[in-house]
Image (cartoon, rainbow, N blue to C red):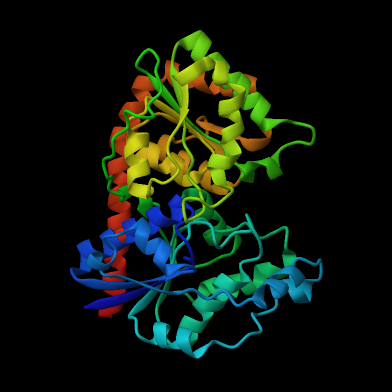
Amino acid sequence: MKRFYLSGQRTFDNRGCEAIVRSTVDLLTAQFGEVEVLVPASDEAMDRIQWPEAAARGVRFVRSYRPPHGRYWVQLQRLPFRPLQGASWPFAMPAWLRKDLASVDAVLAVGGDNYSLDYRIPSPVMAVDRFAMDLGKPVILWGGSVGPFDRVPGLVAPMTRHLSRMHHVAARESVSYGYLTEKLGLRNVIRMADPAFVLATEPVDVESFWPRGDGRVLGLNVSELIERYRRPGQNLRSEVGQFIRHVVTAHGMGVLLVPHVNPLPQNGTGGDSAYMAPLLAQLADLGDAVTMMPRHFNAAQTKYVIGKLSFFIGARTHATIAALSSGVPTISIAYSVKARGINRDLFGSEDMVLQTPDVSAATLREALDRLLRDESPLRSTLTRRVGELQAMARSATARISEQLAS
């Protein structure tokens, strides 16, 4: 039986992270048969509740590496000093983590965009992968978007050396692949699709929250995350509210707000539900034409709900992947390379991408008009291309088998 460790994973608060883990376990099981997959968790009990069947699938939740003192190092690295930006993680590997890493055959660095600057310099993530490489374990960056790192110049050279030590860097989209091979000059890069393209669905009853309308339902996901990419003085929720009102009154469609990141346990505060809740209050006069999906659904259930939509517009990458992989015509609200690359690979262009700073009631209306106008060719393209991307994910899994055999 093969054993794997999923570095870069910490919590199922983000249904995208959960989708990656579930799909990766499915891919590994299909390739190797019985497997054991060590999944780090900041709260093991909460993640088990989120995925009750995990143990039966070979998943063992383990302690995640997040030393309290590490956050101060990450804050220091934000200072504009090159020696700090490119400095190695200065803390020793704890014995419990050494034991976990030593027990596996390979480490898959998951997370989608951990190896980027979308959130911070990824020092803790790099540390775990370096620990594993120092132990002689094969480390594969698994279906991620990478970089660019140019705005932190001191990080470029050490990041390039770090990535070059991995057995494979499996880029999930062409923009990252080009950056890795052309800009960083790496030779260990392969292409794959985001593993969440193969995520299986779990049916739920939608009747209690499904919006009324003419039969067509637009799914919408916006989040607090994209506020940081907005132009000063713009009110995102006000613009989105105006757009939703237009969808209902001008097109007769229902609108379902789809949260994709929510804290566990389910009574936690914050997340997409809390951010979008004021939209419901703002549009209360529209009644049940505008509703919100319950916040407690897991990743597989959320994909099932998204798959029943007529159209989708979303900011969370894995919410859009759930829609795209379900054949739902989708507009991606983009704040990084990942949405651009995924759309370029699916459609051959970035026509279905709306850049975050450009989001307004007017641009959202234009996006919906494009979905309505091109619905048929979009569905045809997705029917053809999604199967090809799923095959790419399976092919990358076969490369792991080849690597371990050698």
Up/down of 400 relative to 320, above or below:
below
Residue 47 picture quarter: bottom left
Quarter of the N terminus within the rendering? bottom left
Q: Left or right: 379 with respect to 177?
A: left
At a point 48% along the width and 60% down the height, the residue shown is: 111
Q: Residue furthest bottom?
A: 95
| Residue nearest the viewer, comparing 183 with 30 | 30
Q: Position of residue 6 (x, y in %)?
A: 41, 69
Q: Answer yes or no: is residue 122 visible.
A: yes
At a point 38% along the width and 53% down the height, the residue shown is: 19
Up/down of 12 relative to 91, above or below:
above
Q: Residue furthest left?
A: 33
Up/down of 153 relative to 99, above or below:
above
Residue 311 picture quarter: top left
Residue 305 picture quarter: top left
Q: Position of residue 198 (x, y in %)?
A: 30, 49
Quarter of the C terminus within the rendering? bottom left
At a point 49% along the width and 45% down the height, the residue shown is: 317
Q: Position of residue 197 (x, y in %)?
A: 35, 47
Up/down of 352 relative to 372, above or below:
below
At a point 27% along the width and 48% down the height, the residue shown is: 200
Q: Residue furthest front?
A: 267
Q: Left or right: 215 with respect to 34?
A: right
| Residue nearest the viewer, comparing 73 with 266 | 266
Q: Left or right: 402 with respect to 369?
A: left
Q: Position of residue 196 (x, y in %)?
A: 37, 51
Q: Answer yes or no: is residue 369 visible.
A: no
| Residue nearest the viewer, comparing 42 with 93 | 42
Q: Across the whole image, how many numbered discs are drawn on residues?
A: 0
